[in-house]
Amino acid sequence: MENFVVSARKYRPSTFDSVIGQDHITSTLKNAIKTNQLAQAYLFCGPRGVGKTTCARILAKAINCTNPTPDMEPCNECESCRSFNENASMNIMEIDAASNNSVDAIRSLVDQVRIPPQTGKYKVYIIDEVHMLSQAAFNAFLKTLEEPPSYCKFILATTERHKIMPTILSRCQCYDFRSIGIEDIVKNLKHVAESEGISYDLESLTMIAKQAQGGMRDALSIFDQMVSFGGGKLTAQDCAKNLNVLSHEDYLKLVDLLRAGDIAKTMLAYQDIYARGINGQHFLTGLSEHVRNLLVAHDPQTYKLMDMGEETRSLFSQQSVTCGLPLLLRYLDLSSDFEFRFKEANNKRLFVEICLMKMASIVLQPAKQAQPAAPVRPS
């Protein structure tokens, strides 16, 4: 059997242009290479799985490439690029600070820095999880980081910038990577699914993207898991079941019960949701988001703000018209208020049930009638 390569590795970007959601950083790095204004040390900060180490590798490969493209991308054909792609480059070293965090490891690195590259232009040291270095290791690294040889470049990466010593920060150009948007994650997941010949629907990809919380690597890991669960295809129902989250269909049915004022069936519906182990906070957050989407679907101008397929959008639009804006606004007011106060509740289940009962009872309340004006007494 052929060894399986996870999607996060198989589809790892190899050029600046293929990095997702970090255009502000990749364009800056390409301009720095083009104008020959490379710093001696870079610090890449940001959440996990957003491209810090990937950008570090591309930068290291690009500055050693002997035949870069006009757009300052590595050519992937020269000897330096080929040796890097084959994990045989002697000029680009990647160090995991989590397992090499002692002062002795840094002293060994400093000794290696003194030796110039035998081939190529630069020796590049990529130090991942640099915040894991000990205080003594940081101190041993300071002088070399401030005044390295002209042929040496350092690229540090961390998820916890606040743990880095100010003296280290002041010696680096700092780049803040941001979380990747749902739209960008979905777009990349589409590309991966189509490349692998996997059938999918937009709602399943959106569900995976939301679960990844801004990390492309997390999204691809969840994607692989869902494909294995679905036997080579992705459906919203399978994703909701495996990720233990509620689908749009669950919330659409629930709002229909709320609109009908059927408190008994609403309580039974929540019992099924509770039995599936859905966290009450997540349920209320999802309910508020669902009502928000209904409000968005009510106006053609905001219709495109919903991250879902056209068929699902149509269902939202129908339910939005049926409920009407005044009712939806009252739903959103209640759900967001209970979501905000959820942590204060001792009985979490009862707290959610009270929210649902209040929402269902709105249509049962008599419409407020205008009161006659009080007679004006003569002076």
Image (tube, grey):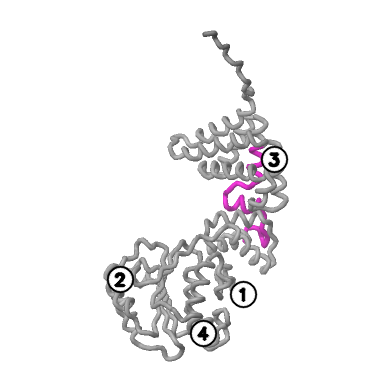
In the rendered image, residue 164, in percent from the top left (x then y), is placed at 34, 65
For the point 54% across and 57% down, the residue is 212
The residue to which callout 1 is attached is: 2
For the point 55% across and 36% down, the residue is 333
The residue to which callout 2 is attached is: 138
The residue to which callout 4 is attached is: 65
The quarter of the image holding the N terminus is: bottom right
The residues bearing labels 1 and 3 have C-alpha atoms spaced at a distance of 49 Å
Identify the element where label 4 is drawn.
Answer: loop
Neighbor class of circle 4 (other Cα within 10 Å; few <14, some 14-19, many 20+) is many
Q: Nearer the viewer, mark 1 or mark 3?
A: 3
Q: Which amino acid is tagged 2?
A: Phe
Neighbor class of circle 2 (other Cα within 10 Å; few <14, some 14-19, many 20+) is many
For the point 71% across and 36% down, the residue is 322
Is there CB contact under 8 Å for labels 3 and 4?
A: no
Is there CB contact under 8 Å for labels 1 and 3?
A: no
Q: Which residues are magenta?
A: 228-255
